[in-house]
Image: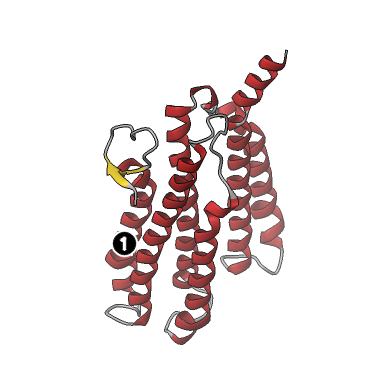
Amino acid sequence: MFKWQRNQACPVGTPCMKFSYFYPLLGFTLPTILISYGIAIPQSCLAGINPPTVGLGIFIVAACVTYWLGIHLVLRDLAADSLNPSKIPVLRLRHLIPLFIFIFLAGLIAYGFIIPRSCIAGINEHSFGFGIALFFAAICYIEGVQRTLRKVLGHDHVDAIPVPLTLNHFYPLLIFLVTTVVIGYGAVIPKSCIAGWNELTIGFGLALLGASIAYWQGVRMALRERKPMRKEHNEAS
């Protein structure tokens, strides 16, 4: 079992949980609870205790458990990697297995059983909002796992600290977004049969959001590998 520590470094060879690893989780759960149970649900047909509101609570608890499992997997691998000092901790596919299982089960139960039998059946702001919550839960999980790895890289692999992101890295993305938004929402969509606020125009916006996140993660991965690659090149020369 992992030991808990607050801000001190973990003892050598002893993996431990730190409260700072759970900051992304708090950033997801607190706004989700306040917005859902404090604003959205009381003003909708879901007000009160019913399967959708109970299911949302179970969803939040399951997201927390999934997050903890992800950190647990990372720390377990870091403990194994500590036996090999030359091995730099990286994000592995098995670290994302709890996230894949959570998204599959949450989406299946919510959109396959609970929502179709409730007053928010169909495409509306509430069913759409659950999808947004699921999306941000995934981002929160990935950020938490990466945060744990960054902490280890900062303490145990100083030479592997990633280069910080700057605004210059996002100029291509800004050009793409501005051009696509102007052409899509300013010229093409208003003159088509999907003009207005509907699932197709919302889906187009989500596609832009997904492309932006993919770009951001790709740049981060490239910068994270930059220093180790440079170090290996210097050693070879």
The reply to whether residue 34 is in sight is yes
Nearest to the observer: residue 165 or residue 90: 90
17 left or right, relative to 161: left
Query: Toward which corner of the image does residue 151 lie, by quadrant?
Result: top left
54 left or right, relative to 230: left
204 left or right, relative to 49: right
Picture coordinates of residue 56 (x, y %)? 37, 71
Residue to which mark 1 is pinned: 33
- In this view, 25 is above or below 134: above
Q: Residues within 10 Å of mark 1 (few under 14, many from 20)?
A: some
- In this view, 66 is above or below 105: above
Picture coordinates of residue 104 (x, y %)? 54, 69
Dividing the image into 4 quarters, which one contains the C terminus? Answer: top right
Q: How is the image coloured?
A: secondary structure
Nearest to the observer: residue 83 or residue 207: 83
Label 1 sits on what residue type? Ile
Picture coordinates of residue 210 (x, y %)? 60, 52
* Residue in the picture at 57% in, 29% down: 86
Picture coordinates of residue 64 (x, y %)? 37, 59
